[in-house]
Image: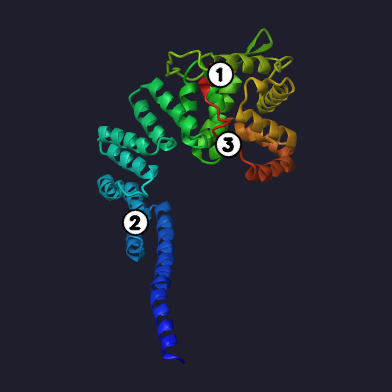
Amino acid sequence: MNYRILSIIFILTLFSLPNVIGQSNYDKALELRQKAINLMDNEHANESIILLKQACRLDLDSNNIIYKYEIACAQYIKQDYRAAIRTLKKILNNNKANDKVYQLLGNSYDFIGRSKHAFEVYNLGLKKFPNSGRLYLELGVMELKKSNYEMALSLFEKGIYVAPCYSSNYYWASKIYFGTSNKLCGLIYGEIFMNLERIGTRVEEISELLYVITKKSLISSDSTIALNFDKNILKGEPYILNDSLKCFQFNIMYKSLLSTSLSNIKNIDMDVLSQIRIDFIKKYFSEKIYNKFPNSLFEYQYKLFVYGYFDAYNHWLLKSGNQNEFGLWYEKNKVNWDNFVDWFLRNSIHIDEFNRFFSSQYQ
């Protein structure tokens, strides 16, 4: 073989060798990271840190912060917040640092009692990531701790506005509204939250609240069922909001359509609540109310109705409120439930900046 050809082959091999090694190290680092995450999930933070430090040494991209961020997560999980702060401060100015870095750093400061620093970090993050739902969430939670309910709610709703698919702001906004005389917004936020998060203890909590609040808002007087979302239901009604007119026109529309479904109702259970919701969504679209009051949640409900799954969906939505009632319905509707679950897993609600719902949009 020609010497020049041999030289070219040698040079090409020489230059490609680091890439092969680098790729191998890259894969190994990713493998270690996944093992570390699994360890964190099983509360073995110390072991996960060891693996993540190995991954850092293997990773040839000096600008990659993912492993250091995961180390900070493990330190946070083991409640070594000062160590997490030291780790996060090293990567805060990296151009790959995202809003999660600012969130974790702020949370770590908050846990060691440095709430002022946490507040500054969240706001610094918002300057860099103005559409971060998670940073508005953290600021809202800080105000909630100080019983500044209106400020907290405004921050949660700002988070909903800029990041309509981020679930946690809906969760907290719904809980604030549940504690006021304006529970309708809480019901809608709570239902959107359940659609976005779908599983977990928070979903079960909101499911129970949706059932209890909806049922207790249907009051009986002289053998007649009437709707009143403004009455005191929860103990203490802890949150007083000055802006009682939020969503006022929407409230009137919702109550008007819902009230027409209440005639001849004697007893209120999960099946009846489902039927009331079915009647509402049919009228909402047949009477073209959506032209004046567009709502991504109601659009999704109507899609469920068209496919024949709205009754099953309603029982999923309310099932934590009364497991016995849900169980009785399930025994009679196993096939429909299984079909609904299969469809539900493949068809989630679609929310974006064009169809998001927030309480002040109809004022």
Image quadrant where residue 133 sits: top left
- What kind of element bears circle 3? helix
What is the distance, in whole Å, between disc 2 and disc 3 at their CAs? 37 Å
Q: Amino acid at mark 3?
A: Asn
Q: Give residue 151's position: percent from left, percent from top.
A: 38, 22
- Which residue type does callout 1 highlight? Tyr
Disc with the residue nearer the chain's start (2 vs 1): 2
Above or below, 46 against 201 in this view is below
Nearest to N terminus: mark 2 or mark 3: 2
Residue in the picture at 37% in, 50% down: 96
Q: Amino acid at mark 2?
A: Asn
- Tell me if residue 183 comes above or below residue 5 in the rendering: above
* Cα distance in 3D space between marks 2 and 1: 46 Å
Task: Name the spot of residue 274 as percent of width and height, x first.
Answer: 68, 27
Residue at image mark 3: 195
- Return the mark for residue 63: 2
Q: Nearer the viewer, residue 255 or 30?
A: 30
Determine the image quadrant of residue 304. Answer: top right
Q: Residues within 10 Å of mark 3 (few under 14, many from 20)?
A: some
